Amino acid sequence: MENHLLSIVTFLPIFGAVVIALVPREKLNWIRWGAAAITGLQLILAIWILKVFDFSTPEVQLVEHYAWIPDFNIEFFMGIDGLSAPMVLLTALLSFLAVFTSWNIEKAQKGYFALFLLLDAGMMGVFVSLDFFLFYIFWEVMLLPMYFLIGIWGGPQREYAAIKFFLYTLFGSVLLLLGMLALYFISEPHTFNMLILAEQSSQFGKGLLLGMNAGKVIFILLFVGFAIKVPIFPFHTWLPLAHVEAPTAISVILAGVLLKMGTYGFLRISFPILKEAAIWFALPLAILGLINIIYGAMAALAQRDLKKMVAYSSVSHMGFVLLGMAALTPAGMNGAVFQMFNHGTISAMLFMLVGVVYDRAHHRDIEGFGGIAKVVPIYAGVTAMAFFAGLGLPGFSGFISEALCFIGAFPVFTWITIFATLGIVLNAGYFLWAYQRIFMGELNSKYENLEEINNRELFALIPLAIITFFLGVYPTPMLNLMSSSLNHLVEVVKSAGMVAGL
Amino acid sequence: MDHLNSYLVLSAILFSLGLYTVVTRRNAVAILMGVELILNAANINFVAFSKFVTHNLDGHLISVFIIMLAAAEAAVALAIILNLYNDRGHINVDEANALKQ
Amino acid sequence: MADFIFWMIWALIVASAALVAFGNNLIHSVFALMGTFLGVAGIYIFLNADFIAVTQIVVYVGGILVLLVFGIMLTNKIQSAQISQSSVQKGLGVLVVLGVLAIVLTAVLPHNWVGGTTPMAFDDTVKGIGRLLFTDYLILFEIASVLLLGALIGAATLARKEL
Amino acid sequence: MIKLALFILFLPLLSFALQIFFGRRFEDKKGEWVSVGIQFSTLIMSLVMLVMMLSKGDPDFSIELHQSWLDLGLFKIDLGIYIDNITVIMLNVVAIISALVHLYSTAYMAGDVRYSRYFGFLGIFTFSMNGIVLANSLFMIYIFWELVGLSSYLLIGHWWEKDSAANAGKKAFITNRIGDIGMFTGMLIIATVLGTFNFQLIAERIHDGMWAANAGMLFGGIEPHKLLTIAGVLVFMGAVGKSAQFPLHVWLPDAMEGPTPVSALIHAATMVAAGVYLTVRIFPFLTADAMATIAFVGGFTAIYAATIAITQNDIKKVLAYSTVSQLGYMIMALGTGAYVAGFFHLVTHAMFKGALFLASGSVIHAMHHSLHHLKDHETDPQDMRNMGGLRTKMPITFGVFMVTTASISGIPLFSGFLSKDAILAGTWAYAANVHDGWLAHLHLAWILPVFGFGAAAITAFYMFRLIFMTFYGEPRQPKIFKHIKESPKAMTIPLVVLATMSLFIVFTLPSVNPVSDHGWFTTMVQSPESAVTTGAAFDLEHFKHGLHEAHVPAMVASITVAGLGILLAVLVYLLGKISADNLAAKLGALYRGSYNKWYMDEFYINGIIRPFLKGCNALGRFDLDFYDHYLINGWGRNVKRSSKGVGLADDLIVDGAVNFSGIIFQWLGWTLKFIQTGKIQNYLIFVLIGAVMLFVVNVF
């Protein structure tokens, strides 16, 4: 059993999707509880994985390695290390909680949950694959359910949003595919195995592709592919729309897990395999991180739609990840991955909270509320907590990861970091301003009978809140989980040269 | 008779004649006969190569399969032809030009 | 003697095939086709392919030819004993077919076959074919049987009056 | 002692948790007394610590507790608590004020809508404030720094139904965060160069030359002492925000929207003093230039805020600007090297300003009740123009007001005199004796005593103006006056306690000389040695020498200016010899400027915030309506358009070519009568023709 934990945790949702597809559509509760049971089981497995996982070494563990398509040297290769372990946990956790967030889906619940589980499998697969080809397959597997989930169960502009999301990401995928194939054909013997590719890293720096340094060309190809997922400015415009139109649970998954896949791709593939190019591109990456932070925060400040604001805040928060990892220092790298996890939990909370108020008021216009803390004090309290977590208040995990990103980036990108700290103020600005406009002031008489948050919604929020708070006070468990792998990664990449600072 | 080329030339001629039949005949049954000629030409080649070049029985096997295929093809083709006849009262291929539209 | 027979058969094949191709009477064509089939069977014997030769006779002459005759009979008025046939685009056809023939011959004849062209006499092809059929070609064999079954059913279905 | 400190730190957090989760259920069952009890128990523990400290009598006493918090293998952050005499004194200040404010609030806040939550927030505030006090590293201070910001936000916005309160909370938080950026950047510089956040280690490593060795790695090889100056000033920016120094002072007056006990606790006595405390902590590694900057900012703030306080009519606003001004004093003192004086003033100010706020709260409470009685919701209970003659109705409050005003104005026998005098002597000594730092280099050092004495005179004036307007003269609103009552015991007891703490003797025992600050305080608190060795150090020895000489002239001068200020106040507001209105009219622009706070808020709103928000809106629109709409979607549209073009080209050219060949063949067929399209054999022959042609082309 333990030897196959990763495949089980990955393919369990697919099995669940099949089972749900067989349940008659009238048995709504069976469908919902089935999805909850499957994702719950997955969560238990994920926790088990972490228990089995030995975090003291940077080695890849729980390996499953079989030949798959031997003619092309394609392998079925799964394994996790300190980089993927937090992501596995995050995926399982958010999938489980998102099931409860999607309890009130109004139409075609069967299809919804089946697709949702398929999506879950795709995401999990991305995080555990160590063969690029397998990685790419899961990457694409996840795309299609997402398209339908947004396109069918989304808001008024859902079709436009879904198509935009789909085309955008597909565009990225094509570049990713090109980069992948280039890596495959340059490596000798041809392989998709990420570990072997990383060992051959020096070859990519030397070769030529289209008359340019192969490593750099491939890096750029992969960069665009991943950047669209993150999303990095200027590839970010699918995000506000997709987030806003997607149903709440899907927004949660989008912000919580999907965005992480981009940065995960950088750290799993681009950095170790294309070391020289990574170092060459570190400075632009940091600058893009800065732009993300400031641009996202400023755009968030301008939004009147609460969900859009939260979506732009994601852009801003992912900027910290970029800044931290571009610096290639232990603190920055750990901070970046920790921020990935924290943004997963925090933005999930934020989207769930937006969903709660949208379910009741049927709009998300920040200006359209006012004073509702009076009628929904518990909701107001939980939202305040989530907002403060979002703006990086000490005591919540986001603070630690942001601080680590800054500490790590400062020696390398001094000026960029100094400008990036402005993001702290802007974050506080839009969160507090939005909070004031929604919850404070005179009570808007329209909402005198607004319903308080219910237990099911709280059930989805409280675990996230506890995790955010716990890791904010005592981050060691999570940092221990990843630090040895990430320190190793930093060493490996740094072996190829020095980062040009600014 | 102990030279490969004599067989190849025979096969080529047979093939050409079959092709000509297929291309020029108006009657569907005649066209079918042309197809049989072509298949026979191919068969001769297989068997001849089997004897002269590859020195094993693979060619023979392919021939067997071709023959079998020919039988099946003839059966189906005739069925179609019968239908065509039932439909139109003749089996002239050049008048079966529904493809034109 | 053998040479003579060989060339006779050779000529028979060419002549009967030409009749199939150019003949004006459909009935003649069918009988000429029988000649061709038998000739080809003879050629097989020269090629030491006794099993194929037998199969050729059984299937072509005994099966396909009969089918063709049935086809002709069923699609022509029984009164007209002279079943004439006409052709189209003859000139172009001749040109093109000659072109094809030229191509095939120029491609094949000067070619230097790998392993040379020394003839080899097979002793007992039936046994060999049988063995191959049930080892290397087993799947093909099974597929063939399915194909035949399909053709059988398909033909039967198509041939029914009320389609 | 460590254990006691931990209890002091975490008990208020317990209070917070209890009140937040269970408080609502016990609101009618005296649930608040749990918090009050917890607070008084921490007070007792603090006093125990104070006694322990005094019995040791060692000025260099210190203990430290380390706890690894975050360990990445190659990078570590330790948290821990550091206790020395300053910590103990500060803990006592926080505990005293906090406990008294808790007690006071039970009366003042009685019947409030969010009563239990209010006590919970007081708990988390006390927790975070104690965290700042006990922190042993910059990082830990930063953590609690933000947390006091949070509690300040929550408490200012306690009555969030009022827009002004909600705005004030947000403003406070964001303004503080601007300061925090600087502080954080400063921390980053220090941590990058020295690899630690720990105060003791920082000082040690700077002293051992690690700074000089490593500083060059930042900013392309900057000079070490310049970098140290920058780092010091940046960290000090945190203090600028939290202690409401110019130009980030704007949040503090607005913060008066919070309940008055909160103003006393957070915005007068403790949290705003955290900036001063931070400056105390980083004092050992400030360079002369950094100190000059600090002194100038403090001095300017002191006089700037004082000039605004003169013209305010809201009783709390006057006190708020007075607080800003006094904080400026402390900062200035630290900047001039008068370390002990600065910290001393922090402590004395906490006591008397806390008392002043609570006393003003008592007045407001009385006004409020009177107005409530009259069912008047229009009149502002905080406006001094509605008061007057209250001394007969509220004798205890009046007495407390008198004592504390005397203290803040610098009248001998009161604590404020001692500390303020020490500060003024410090500025004097700095101006006369110190030649380091840019102020001295530019020959501007004398501006500090000018700021100091000027502010002292103005302080005396506006404080007595407040007293006279509130408690003397004829009642301006007799109707309201009729219903004014003295506040309940729960409010007056804290007042009296704090007023007692404003007597000089509290700080000078065992010595009883009212004009000398010599006593336990000055023995226990002594200026630390500077760790700066890189040639830009502040000349502390020289300064101390000068301080001794400046003591007497400064004292005389300070008593004189205070006397002048009081005299003017008496003339204008008590005796009416000079008309305030005439004075205002004569001063014209100056009066209007002062009344409108020198238009700083307007400048920020119109000059920075609005344009910035406009920029944000433009950017938001740019992002979706331009960038996304035209560029991204435009790209899509272009692809669509070009595929349409390709389609058209396909129709015209490719298909045309096909048709053309079709035409040719039709013509061929027509002429040769061989070919007619639509027949399978024709197609077959075309294929053959093609094959033959291909072959021919290939071979020849």
Image (cartoon, coloured by chain):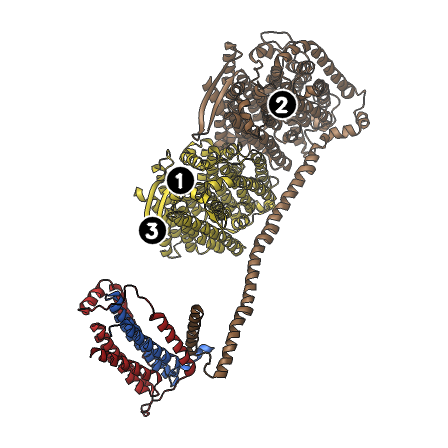
Chain colours: A yellow, B blue, C red, D brown
Please report contact status of discs 3 and 1: CB closer than 8 Å, yes or no.
Answer: no
Quickly name the residue at label 3: A68
Q: Secondary structure at mark 1?
A: helix
Q: Amino acid at mark 3?
A: Trp
Q: Find residue A197 and report its horizontal and vertical position in percent.
A: 40, 44
In the rendered view, tell whether residue D114 sits above or below residue D558: below
Q: Secondary structure at mark 3?
A: strand
Q: Amino acid at mark 2?
A: Ala
Q: Which mark is residue D290?
A: 2
Please report whichever mark, 3 or 1, sits nearer to the chain's N-terminal start: 3
Host chain of mark 1: A
Q: Which mark is residue A454?
A: none
Q: Amino acid at mark 1?
A: Ala
User: Along the line of sight, which residue is nearer the eye, D441 or A316?
Assistant: D441
Quickly name the residue at label 1: A85
Q: Name the residue located 50 percent from the left edge and 79 percent from the top edge.
A: D666
